[in-house]
């Protein structure tokens, strides 16, 4: 007979509910229980598992709910925990609250469970964030979390890849190699050699579509703007447009048109659904976009189009036409393709 | 058996049982403890309390800044001094590189030959976004490589300075690493998963606050009534400031400063129990918070 593993049922249920736990997390929890941590009662076990596994208040709540649903052992002694908690894997799985709101509304009629939806305002404008709760004992059993297409932190890290180092400005950085080289061929004491400091000379123009079809990704656009500020570029210019970037505006309200910045060549990133959100195919829109890119190619290179919709949604829409524009690389907004988009901006 | 941390044996800090359990868990599993909480709730003092109770000497406090680099915490290569020596009378001194490499604060704490210590990485959220990832591997295995030390000089460095290219902690005796964060920036997922997380909540009961005051302020017996009145007034002010959504609500350190100010100025119970307690502005650190609190108190029935 295979001995049931300590906390296996709890661990598996949390993984099933979407928590990013690893084998190492599980082994640490087993090690903690083996040393006597969390063995006093269920509350102590919840606290230990929250400390080891939860990284947000919502994950903490999920851990609590899952463990509370576990079978209550008759005595909270170390030797019994393994069988008590492993029993949860087979006995109580059906009772654990699912993590999707659709399943919540399908609860059995005899329990008279209703779903209460609340909407919290999104801090960046755009669509409000829904939170669903069940009346009764499962009041805070699950919460709908905002899942960004790409997290702001991941984008900020990716922007650091857009690095064009060049020595620029007055000679303020001590060049030890050059000084040592000069010293090695001189019998006297040489003056230290200074060179201009390296800095990132990358310049980026970000153009964000703020038309009605892009409302759902308004917070993503704001997050993209903020992440760009952490990329330590030499210059960042942000513009807004409606549907076609041939007319650019300084503000989201589209009340002050402007032209592209003069000066050194910049990389261009456009964020727009290009008609994919509503499934429109507008050849005229594609033609105007193509003309815009042709007209700015001398000043804006490389050029990248970032679409919040997945590639499958581009088929049959203006986005499909724009993806074929020469000299323009198109990507969809997910962590892997965002990194590829940055690589394209680097010229790779 | 290793001594465990109770959180009650020092005269300057009191930790709730759930916090001391998590400290002991982090030590038992050899994982860093990530401490979050409001500014002024005692995150840094917890590290000192752990070091004091477990008799691990003075904690190594590393205040993280936006310019902090992970490598500098592990070791430093003094290239400038080497150049100076190369220009000096005895140039042979600068021929070898290893005399110019020294272990940084975290590197010294990890080095197995040194006594076990508590390391406090204070306010890690202030660091550059790459910093937590750079330090992740080191905190994972409590070992690192001194990349700047040439392989040919590693043995001499080990004989003379006590460390070679590979520096690691003693088996089962890694440093006790406590990391504090004010949540100004989000930390990377892999880093969060490596740490054991504890949140220090502000103690909302008068009894706990009195215990904190008694550990930090010398209160003459004749001032007991004043302190009691101050604690009640503080809880009221804090509740109102939370309702007014101030940016930095009054916390433990502000309370301690306020009680000290009241005792120093020989305030009376009546002055503290009134609608506007004496020196109440000390409890706020931001002008806009004072204005928001004042507006909220005026609107209150």
Image (cartoon, coloured by chain):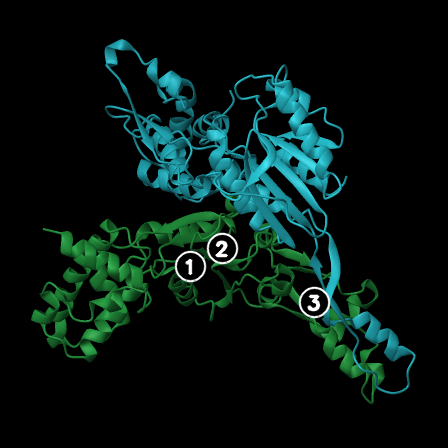
Chain colours: A cyan, B green
Q: Which mark is residue B3?
A: 1
Q: Residue furthest bottom?
A: B89
Give residue A288's quadrant in the image.
Answer: top right
Are circles 2 and 1 on residues that touch, CB within 8 Å? no
On whether disc 2 and disc 1 are found on a single subunit, the reply is: yes
Q: Chain of mark 3?
A: B
Place of residue A259 in the rendered image (x, y in percent of width and height, measured from the top left): 61, 44
* In this rendering, position of residue B241 left or right of residue A38: left
Front label number (2 vs 3):
2
Residue A262, relative to residue A34: is it above or below?
below
Mark 1 secondary-structure assignment: loop
Q: Quadrant of the C terminus of chain A?
A: top right
Tell whether label 3 touches label 1 (CB within 8 Å). no
Q: Which mark is residue B125?
A: 2
| Secondary structure of residue under mark 3 | loop
User: Which residue matches tag 3?
Assistant: B163
Q: Quadrant of residue B216?
A: bottom left
Q: Marks 1/3: CA distance?
A: 29 Å
Which one is earlier in the sequence, the residue at label 1 or at label 3? 1
Q: Earlier in the sequence, mark 2 or mark 1?
A: 1
Tell me the distance, in whole angstroms, between the alpha carbons under discs 2 and 3.
Answer: 31 Å
Q: Secondary structure at mark 2?
A: helix
Q: Are marks 1 and 3 on the same chain?
A: yes
In the rendered structure, the answer to whether residue B68 lies left or right of residue B231 reads right
Q: Chain of mark 1?
A: B
* Both labels 2 and 3 in a single chain: yes
- At 87% from the left and 77% from the top, the residue drawn is A182
Q: Is residue B241 left or right of residue B277?
A: right
């Amino acid at each position: 007979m295979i001995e049931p593993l300590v906390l296996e049922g709890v661990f598996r249920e949390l993984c099933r509910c979407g928590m990013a736990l690893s084998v190492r997390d599980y082994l640490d929890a087993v090690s903690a229980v083996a040393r006597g941590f969390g063995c006093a009662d269920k509350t102590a076990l919840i606290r230990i598992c929250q400390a080891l596994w939860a990284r947000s208040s919502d994950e903490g709540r999920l851990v609590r709910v899952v463990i509370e649903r576990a079978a209550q052992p008759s005595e909270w002694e170390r030797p019994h925990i393994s069988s008590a908690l492993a029993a949860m894997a087979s006995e109580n799985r059906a009772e654990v609250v699912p993590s999707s709101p659709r399943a919540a509304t399908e609860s059995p009629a005899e329990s008279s469970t209703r779903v209460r939806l609340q909407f919290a305002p999104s801090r960046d404008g755009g669509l409000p964030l829904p939170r669903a709760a069940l009346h009764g004992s499962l009041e805070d059993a699950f919460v709908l979390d905002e899942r960004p297409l790409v997290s702001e932190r991941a984008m900020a890290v990716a922007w650091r890849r857009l690095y064009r180092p060049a020595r620029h400005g007055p000679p303020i950085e001590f060049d030890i190699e050059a000084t040592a080289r000069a010293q090695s061929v001189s019998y006297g004491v040489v003056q230290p050699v200074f060179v201009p400091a390296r800095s990132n000379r990358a310049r980026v123009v970000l153009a964000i579509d703020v038309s009605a079809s892009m409302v759902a990704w308004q917070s993503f656009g704001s997050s993209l703007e903020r992440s760009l500020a952490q990329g330590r570029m030499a210059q960042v210019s942000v513009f807004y447009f409606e549907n076609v970037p041939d007319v650019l505006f300084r503000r989201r309200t589209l009340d002050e048109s402007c032209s592209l910045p003069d000066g050194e060549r910049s990389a261009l990133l456009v964020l727009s659904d290009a008609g994919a959100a509503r499934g429109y195919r507008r050849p005229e829109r594609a033609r105007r976009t193509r003309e815009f890119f042709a007209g700015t190619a001398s000043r804006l290179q490389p050029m990248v189009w970032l679409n919040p919709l997945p590639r499958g949604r581009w088929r049959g829409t203006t986005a499909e036409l724009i993806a074929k524009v020469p000299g323009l690389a198109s990507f969809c907004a997910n962590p892997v393709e965002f990194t590829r988009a940055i690589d394209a901006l680097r010229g790779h | 058996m290793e001594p465990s941390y109770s959180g009650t044996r020092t005269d300057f800090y009191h930790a709730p049982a759930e916090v001391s359990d998590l400290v002991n868990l982090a030590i038992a599993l050899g994982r860093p403890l990530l401490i979050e909480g409001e500014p002024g709730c005692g995150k840094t003092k917890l590290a000192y309390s752990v070091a004091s109770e477990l008799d691990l000497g003075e904690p190594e406090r590393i205040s993280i800044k936006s310019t902090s680099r992970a490598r500098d915490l592990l070791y430093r290569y003094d290239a400038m001094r080497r150049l100076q020596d190369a220009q000096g009378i005895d140039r042979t001194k600068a021929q070898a590189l290893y005399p110019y490499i020294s272990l940084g604060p975290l590197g010294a704490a990890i080095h197995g030959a040194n006594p076990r210590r508590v390391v406090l990485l204070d306010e890690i959220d202030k660091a550059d976004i790459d910093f937590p990832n750079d330090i992740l591997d080191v905190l994972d295995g409590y070992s690192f490589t001194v990349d700047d030390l040439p392989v040919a000089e590693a043995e001499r460095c080990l004989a003379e300075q006590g460390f070679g290219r590979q520096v690691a902690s003693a088996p089962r005796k890694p440093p006790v690493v406590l990391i504090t964060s004010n949540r100004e920036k989000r930390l990377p997922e892999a880093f969060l998963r490596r740490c054991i997380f504890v949140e220090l909540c502000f103690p909302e009961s008068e009894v706990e606050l009195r215990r904190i005051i008694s550990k930090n302020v010398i209160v003459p017996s004749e001032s007991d009534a004043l302190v009691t009145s101050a604690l009640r007034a503080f809880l009221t002010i804090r509740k109102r400031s939370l309702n007014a959504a101030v940016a930095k609500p009054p916390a433990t350190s502000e309370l301690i400063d306020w009680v000290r100010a009241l005792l120093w100025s020989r305030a009376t119970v009546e002055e503290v129990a009134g609608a506007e307690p004496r020196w109440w502005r000390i409890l706020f650190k931001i002008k806009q918070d004072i204005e928001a609190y004042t507006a909220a108190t005026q609107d209150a029935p």
